Image (tube, helix red, strand yellow):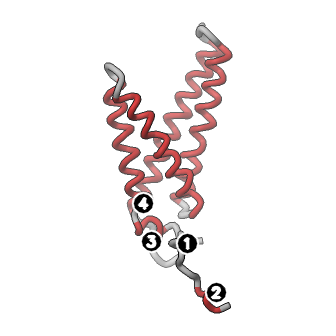
Amino acid sequence: MPAAGPSKPARLTVVAVLNALEGAALVIGGIYLLVMGLLGRPDSPQQAETGGLTLVALGLIPLFAARGLLLRRSWSRGPALITQIIALPVAWTLLRSHGVLIPAGIVLAAVSLTALFQLARPATIEALGIRRPGAASRTDTDA
């Protein structure tokens, strides 16, 4: 549990908002695929519905991570990092495409790199109450 003394750094809020936006985009995309799979005329309704459910499930991960970051829970850094790392190949794929997907790739790459940078900063790690490897707590040294 993080110390109650220091206030939450603004960068933690920024990372939480970025994760929440990514999660919301995934959930909205998933709901769209589900609706189109159920009501539309896709080539494969089963594939559209499965893809939609998958996107909704994947969207919940960054949403939970965002909530954890806002509440300064140490466990939230892992899912947030994984979300950003997974977003980088998606951004690369969008950047290599044509048309309107290229700006989407630029935005996704910028968001992912910004969030990764902020999550790796020592102040963020400290704000989440994460001890560095090899750092002994007082109870470990007293025993």
Q: Which mark is residue 2?
A: 1
Mark before the other along the chain sequence, 2 or 1: 1
Q: CA distance from mark 1 to mark 3?
A: 10 Å
The part of the image, by quadrant, that contains residue 112 is top left
- What residue is at 56 percent from the left and 57 percent from the top? 76
Q: CA distance from mark 4 to mark 2?
A: 27 Å
Quarter of the picture containing the N terminus is bottom right
Label 3 close to label 2 by CB (< 8 Å): no
Q: Crowding near pointer 4: few (<14 within 10 Å), some, many (20+)?
A: few
- What residue is at 36 percent from the left and 32 percent from the top? 105
Query: Left or right: where does residue 113 sit relative to residue 27?
Result: left
Q: Crowding near pointer 1: few (<14 within 10 Å), some, many (20+)?
A: some
Residue type at mark 1: give it.
Pro
Badge 3 marks a residue whose secondary structure is loop
* Circle 4 or circle 1, nearest the eye: 4
Query: Left or right: where does residue 113 sit relative to residue 83?
Result: left
- What residue is at 64 percent from the left and 86 percent from the top? 139
Which residue is identified by label 3?
Answer: 7
Quarter of the picture containing the C terminus is bottom right
Q: Which mark is residue 120?
A: 4
Q: CA distance from mark 2 to mark 1?
A: 16 Å
Badge 2 marks a residue whose secondary structure is helix
